[in-house]
Amino acid sequence: MPARELQQQLNELREQLETGAPLSAENQERLRDLIRQIELKLELETVTPDTGLVDGVNLAVERFELEHPTLAGTLRNIVQSLANMGI
């Protein structure tokens, strides 16, 4: 169940990237890279801690919190889902 919720949140993040407030090409690519890293982690189905991945998502939350609060909220949900999965 947590994996399904995480995938839904990643889909929501993708949608926000496509239809939300304009971001620089660099920020869009950073977020897409985070999505790819998370999905790769899901595909591998490992439960070993990957602090680099979570740290990357947390940094993205901080980066977008003021200018794109909806995007930051989705990223926070992703961090929580990762934590619930033990990642």
Image (spheres, rainbow, N blue to C red):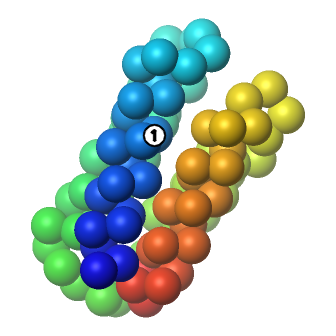
Farthest residue in the left direction?
A: 43
Res. 58 in view:
yes
Element on which disc 1 rests: helix
Image quadrant holding the N terminus, namely bottom left
Q: Is 52 located above or below residue 1 in the figure?
A: above
Whether 19 is drawn above or below 53: the answer is: above
Who is closer to the viewer here, 38 or 6?
A: 6
Please identify the quarter of the rendering in which residue 60 is found: top right
Q: Residue 14's x, y, as percent?
A: 38, 34
Residue occupying the point 30% across, 88% down = 47
The residue identified by callout 1 is 13
- Classed neighbour count for the residue bearing mark 1: other residues with Cα under 10 Å, few (<14), some (14–19), many (≥20): many
The answer to whether one can see residue 49 in this image is no
On screen, residue 31 above or below 61: above
Q: Name the image quarter holding the C terminus.
A: bottom left
Q: Is residue 3 above or below residue 26?
A: below
Q: Position of residue 3 (x, y in %)?
A: 29, 73
2 and 41: which is toward the camera = 2
Q: Position of residue 9 (x, y in %)?
A: 42, 53
Q: Amino acid at mark 1?
A: Leu
Q: Residue furthest right?
A: 66
Residue at point 43% right, 88% down?
A: 86
Left or right: 56, with 3 as reference point = right
Q: Is residue 58 left or right of residue 33?
A: right
The residue shown at (45%, 40%) is 13
Q: At x 48% / y 85%, what residue is drawn? A: 84
Q: How many marks?
A: 1
